[in-house]
Image (tube, grey):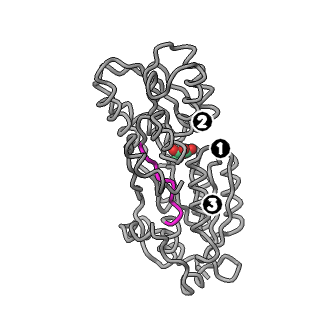
Amino acid sequence: MVSKMFRTRSLAAGLAVLALGLAACSSGGDSGDGETAGSGDGGDGGAISVGFSQVGAESGWRAANTKSIQDALTEEAGFDLSFSDAQQKQENQIQAIRSYIAQGVDYIAFSPVVESGWDSVLEEAKQADIPVILTDRAVDSEDTSLYVTFIGSDFVEEGKRIGDWVSENLGTEPINVVELQGTTGSAPAIDRKTGFEDAIEGNDNISVIASETGNFTRAEGKTVMEGFLQAYPDIDVVYAHNDDMGLGAIEAIEAAGKVPGQDIKVVTIDGVKDGMTALAEGKISYIVECNPLLGPDLAEIIKTLEDGGTVEPRIVTKDEAFDQEGAKAVLADRQY
Ligand code: AHR
């Protein structure tokens, strides 16, 4: 059984220095030896109980992320996973987290749909001595003792890499860019916008003529792009904060009788199979990857804490970037 003392020690340790080797994590980590599995108090004979609140099922990226978590936090690996889908609603996530607190799970992990408004529920988890792990997206809480660690990509860097590529490859002459933002108030929407703006600052050839949310979904990306095409006859580039919105924009561009990749260039973030296929076909021009395969790392973090180890308060995952040739080279082996 995990004592309150153990939990407190783990939480404090989590704020200390790195002891987690992420290279080892991606191989799947410890598959649940008897000692670790025997130390949990999940009420089912020793598994570590974890409540995970997912953002939703808005994109191909999210589907891959959910699968990775469910594949890693299995019974065989020593976990008792409770999983909930918040359908992109913060109130659903808060309700799910409160229910995990009431159940007395050993750990709570979640990917926050938006950045703000988490302090109260995170304080409740802290009072209940339940360590919280943020995956994928950040919260803006000033009190970082409310969670043990945050694992995920550097979204500002992703936006910056897109902006650098656009600036160097397309911004050598005047261009009009439209931006499809992710979910309003979410960390990736805020950070990818900031990173892109920072990168293109100083390049007077680039004008961002419109920017609206497409909520990270293909359908909304298409609808917003249809509006852009009607309002602006002279769009050169679409910057979509994820592949799905970019793919929706491609449908709108084709329906308007234009050729994506030629008449209008599309650049996106994620690198899911559908996006990489469109890149290999020349419909998308450049993709910065956002790695969704966080499950093994999450399992390793929990096992490390459970064993009294320490993890860094911020763990940044590694992302690649692809042009057309790069996409063709990796597409056959792409896991998601
Ligand atoms: O938080 C990660 C983002 O969320 C992905 O880039 C997007 O596809 C998803 O909806």
Q: Residues within 10 Å of mark 2 (few under 14, many from 20)?
A: many
Query: Which comes before the other along the chain, label 1 or label 2?
Result: 1
Inter-mark Cα distance, 3 to 1: 14 Å
Q: From this viewpoint, is residue 197 visible?
A: yes
Q: Percent x, y for residue 183?
A: 57, 37
Instruction: Indicate the amino acid at tag 2.
Output: Asn
Residue 208 among magenta residues? no
Residue at left 62%, top 67%?
50
Element assignment for label 3: strand
Q: Magenta segment, which residues?
A: 288-296
Disc 2 marks which residue?
A: 215
99 above or below 74? above
Residue behind mark 1: 88
Judge by depth and name the residue closer to the eye, 107 or 25: 25
Image quarter for ligand 1? top right
Q: What label sits on residue 52 in the rendered view? A: 3
**Could you tell me if the residues under marks 1 and 2 are in contact, i.e. CB atoms within 8 Å?**
yes
Q: Is residue 133 above or below residue 164?
A: below
Mark nearer the viewer, 3 or 2: 2
The residue lying at 67 percent from left, 44 percent from top is: 89
| Horizontal arrangement in the rendering, residue 4 relative to residue 200 (left or right) | right
Marks 3 and 2, the one that precedes in the sequence: 3
Using residue 218 as the reference point, say whether residue 141 is left or right of it.
Answer: left
Q: Contact, CB < 8 Å: mark 3 with mark 1?
A: no
Please provide percent x and percent y for residue 310: 42, 71
User: Residue 225 occupies which quadrant of the picture?
Assistant: top right
- Disc 3/disc 2 C-alpha distance (Å): 22 Å
Nearest to the observer: residue 37 or residue 229 = 229
State the residue at coordinates (49%, 49%): 138
Residue 295 located within the stretch drawn in magenta: yes
Looking at the rendering, which quadrant does residue 83 occupy? bottom right
